[in-house]
Amino acid sequence: MTTQAPELESEYRLLREGAGMVDRRESVIAVSGPDAVEFLQGQLTNDVETLDPGDGCYALLLNPKGKILAEMRVLKRAPADLWLLTEQDDAVLSHLTTYKIGRQVEVGRRNAAIKSLIGPRVPDIIGAESPVRECTSTEAIIAGTDVVLVATDLGVDVVHDPARSAALGDELASRGCERAEENAAEVLRIERGRPRYGSDMTADHLPGELGLEERAVSFTKGCYVGQEPVARMHYRGHPNRHLRGIELPEPVSAGALLRLEDKEVGAITSSCVSPLRGPIALALVRREVEPGTELAVGDARLRSRVVELPFERDE
């Protein structure tokens, strides 16, 4: 039986049953100016023209071949002011700066930090002003600090001035939102089957392979960079591989190969030990590998079982 680190188990329980606070590594990129909305509409996969101030969406930045360069949350802060929350800030800045030539658009980093509040008690801690629908945002004041609250799938992110991060954290802790490490939040991410750039998706992948079309791609908007191969796969084809959950008898590192009989059919992309489910992982496997299939892992000593995502569907 796999043993669990006491700290991870307690923080995991906190994030599932109470409220925990995790510092995020995302940066905030501001895109503003008279052409900001039109410009991003032609660069990102989702529809930003239909957003009202306070609305938002999840989107991808692609190369001309439809491969993923970055993932982000787009926040419409004002009619001509949008924020992009992303971990791939260098790639996003470089791309947008190159393509904005000739447009009335300003692109640059904001001096901002993000605390992610996770758990069912988060709305009580934040108060009535807490946004509900994912990627929507609103302004608030916490510990005398102006913040922007952004709804997530598991709670609320607090975008704030880094100089006020300590005071903000102390105030939230005093309200019952205890500090937690990112690895506890990572377990929840894997359980929910949400791919993360750098782990489950890279510049080698198309959105359809990660199951991101419904969440990140608009098929009714106008043209954008990388649209043609994405639309072609959606309407006339299918991905050769897709993201699945993997149940394991013991922990396995990302990169471990998966085999069906003697044929390599995929690889582990993210893995963890869930206090609730034991060793689990995300993997990109060939499309013919159905849920319920048993696969050999690594040197074939271990056997794994393919499951549908999210893992929570079996609760």
Image (cartoon, rainbow, N blue to C red):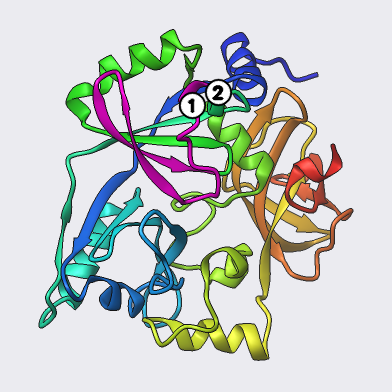
Q: Which residues are magenta?
A: 124-152
Q: Position of residue 154 (x, y in %)?
A: 58, 37
SS under mark 2: helix
Residue 97 picture quarter? bottom left
Above or below 6: residue 153: below
Q: Nearer the viewer, residue 86 or 273?
A: 86
- Report the side of 178 relative to 276 (left or right): left
User: Label 1 is placed on what type of residue?
Assistant: Gly
Q: Residue furthest front?
A: 128
Residues under numbered marks 1 and 2 in contact, where contact means CB atoms less than 8 Å apart: yes
Q: Nearer the viewer, residue 3 or 131?
A: 131
Q: Nearer the viewer, residue 271 or 30?
A: 30
Residue 262 picture quarter? bottom right
Quadrant for the N terminus, please.
top right
What's the mark number on residue 127? 1
- Report the side of 301 relative to 51 (left or right): right
What's the mark number on residue 53? none
Residue 313 picture quarter? top right
